[in-house]
Image (cartoon, helix red, strand yellow):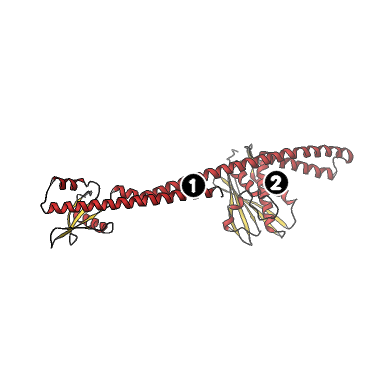
Amino acid sequence: MKSRIPLIILAAIIIGISLIFINKLASSLAKEEHRKMETWAEATRLLLNDEYSDFIFHIIEQNENIPVIIVDDRDHYISARNFNEPKTNVEQYYEKQIQRLKNTNPPIEIVLDENTSQYIYYDNSNLLKMLEYFPYIQLSIIALFLMLVIWAISTDKRAEQDKLWAGLSKETAHQLGTPISSLMAWNEILKTKIGENDIIISEINKDIERLKIITERFSKIGSIPELSQQNISVITEQAVNYMLNRTSKKITYSVEDSSTEHTCLISTPLFEWVIENLCKNAIDAMEGKEGNIDFELFNQEDTLIIEITDSGRGIERNKFKSIFEPGYTTKQRGWGLGLSLAKRIIEEYHNGKIFVKSSELGLGTTFRIELPTIQVES
């Protein structure tokens, strides 16, 4: 945001200077045109009084860009110049033009004698009209340029952040590799001491495998993961069962599957990570109370829909999008990356969508994931 403020100030200064300059220029041009029309009116008066000369004729003929209408003292049309006169309804056309020009410039009186006067109504020249519209055109161009610059800065900043997070993820995966290898070695030693079938060995094996999956997930951030055809219903059940065994008994899980096409191109470790992040987010929203996390799978044409509904505290409508931004969190502890990673995994790696479908404060939230399905020939 701070990088945008100088751009906005600079744009405001440019617009302000331009408006002042153009207004002065337009005002000077308007006065000049008024003087020209006064001269033209005087030449017309002399011509109507039979005081003809080449100079007077030259003055009248010289007006090629200012539309003028000469009327009598009752605003009846007499003659006009520099108008695109229609082939039909000429009288009505000039009546409308006279009414319009009354509000454009003050009329110039032509005194023919003590009892007779005519009046000239005139429009602004095309040049003056262009000057009047130019600030708005310039404002639009500057606004467009400013938006493009801000977009470029935001894109560059996001790319830099993505590179930072990708590097951090890969370094985390790399750092985890050494202790995992060490744990595997110590586990082999334990097997020789207490036997392979001991429950402690079994649980340690599960945790080591879990650490391997976590390491694999972190290593995939920032690089294009390999996707394979997987049954989303089965993967979802696996992820839910994993969370079921590792969360409070106060939390009740359910999976309702009415889908007919389950197969999608996914990265299993990353997709399981999304499900786990959404479950953890829902558990945090329940704040230690009893609650439900319900999964519903169904199809809409060639799309598999997964809706995850919790009974947590809910989300304000104006936060539906911001909760997916990196660093956004309502917890005192945490980096605020869970939902941001979920969005990136689903939308950038799996060509899908993830968003808050609905939420009510005090009642809960429904997240929705959309994934393109693959028709598998039987």
Relative image position of residue 53 (x, y in whole percent): 12, 47
From the image, tell me which residue sits under label 2: 238
Spatial CA span between label 1 and label 2: 45 Å
The circle on residue 23 is none
Locate residue 287 relative to residue 110 in the image: left or right: right
Image depth: mark 1 or mark 2 in front: 1
Q: Is residue 123 left or right of residue 253?
A: left
> Which picture quadrant has residue 112?
bottom left
- Amino acid under disc 2: Gln
Q: Mark 1 = which residue? A: 147
Closer to the camera in the image, 261 or 378: 261
Residue at the image point whose x is 36% and y is 50% from the top: 133
Residue drawn where x is 50% and y is 44% of the image:
149
Image location of residue 276, percent across then percent down: 68, 48
The residue at the far right in this view is: 193
Q: Is 377 situated above or below 120? A: above
Seen from the viewer's position, the closer of residues 192 and 31 is 31
Q: Within 10 Å of the Cα at label 1, are there few (<14), some (14-19), or many (20+) other Cα atoms?
A: some
Q: Amino acid at mark 1?
A: Met
- From the image, which quarter does the C terminus lie in? top right
